[in-house]
Amino acid sequence: MSRLPILDEAALTPKQRQVFDAIANGPRGTVVGPLRVWLQSPGLAERAQALGQYARYDSVLPMHLSELAILVTARIWSSGFEWSHHAPIALASGVPADAVTAIGLGRRFQFDDAQMQAVFDFAVDLHRDRRVGDAAYAAALSALGQEACVDLVGICGYYTLISMTINTFDVPDGDGPRLPTLDGPVSDYFRT
């Protein structure tokens, strides 16, 4: 049984059309993947896409840091669609290729950049352990500041919602790189 709802663009309700057009005419420029699923509930789609626009394009974190957090989220949730779309963006924005490879394999990575390390450790703790440890929080606060820490939680939360949608409704991965399949529980990710 296919769980992926079909969105007939020619038969959108007025509310769906309003949200669809807002997404298509915004910085994303297209309505794909989980955004199409959300349009089955236009009230959710309207609010979630606005949060997503802030998380992806307007937060205080520069693109390479937000993309790093998105990749950690995609790995934790084994979200192939998110990985295939954001791994190339992360690479283009300055996330090192060996870091992207390590994240895909659920491995720890040591960055040369204190801000990137802080984002990585914060996002790993938050997703894997369901809280941010004192050391990771202190490092992020020092390297990024309070507003960025709040935005980082928002980015991780938003992309968790995206990943839940992708995984629940079997959204296909897309044409980008494939996320490696890992064995073992999420609690083991990024331990080594």
Image (cartoon, rainbow, N blue to C red):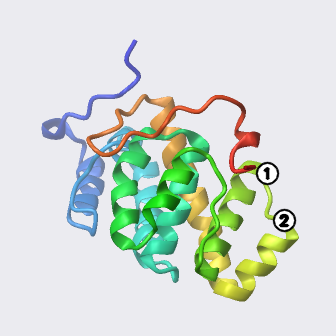
Is residue 88 found left or right of 58 in the rendered image?
left
Q: Residue at x 72, y 33 (%)?
A: 185
Is residue 101 found left or right of 16 in the rendered image?
right
Q: Alpha carbon of mark 2 to alpha carbon of mark 1: how far? A: 9 Å
SS class of the residue under badge 1? helix
Q: Nearer the viewer, residue 22 or 145?
A: 145
Say above or below: 95 vs 145: above
Q: Which residue is mark 1?
A: 129
Residue sitting at the far right:
134
SS class of the residue under badge 2? loop
Dot 2 amino acid type:
Gly
When asked about the image quadrant of residue 140, the answer is: bottom right
Is residue 180 found left or right of 136 in the rendered image?
left
Q: Residues within 10 Å of mark 2 (few under 14, many from 20)?
A: few
Tell me the number on the disc at residue 101.
Answer: none
Dot 1 amino acid type:
Asp
| Rendering coords of residue 98 (x, y %) | 48, 59
Is residue 164 found left or right of 86 in the rendered image?
right
Q: Residues within 10 Å of mark 1 (few under 14, many from 20)?
A: few
Tell me the number on the disc at residue 133.
Answer: 2
| Rendering coords of residue 14 (x, y %) | 24, 49
| Rendering coords of residue 17 (x, y %) | 23, 51
Cβ–Cβ under 8 Å for marks 2 and 1: yes
Say above or below: 120 vs 36: below
Q: Residue at x 49, y 48 (%)?
A: 162
Q: Residue at x 73, y 49 (%)?
A: 192
When asked about the image quadrant of residue 93, the answer is: bottom left
Say above or below: 10 vs 28: above
Q: Nearer the viewer, residue 27 or 142?
A: 142
Q: Residue at x 22, y 55 (%)?
A: 30
Residue sitting at the far left:
10
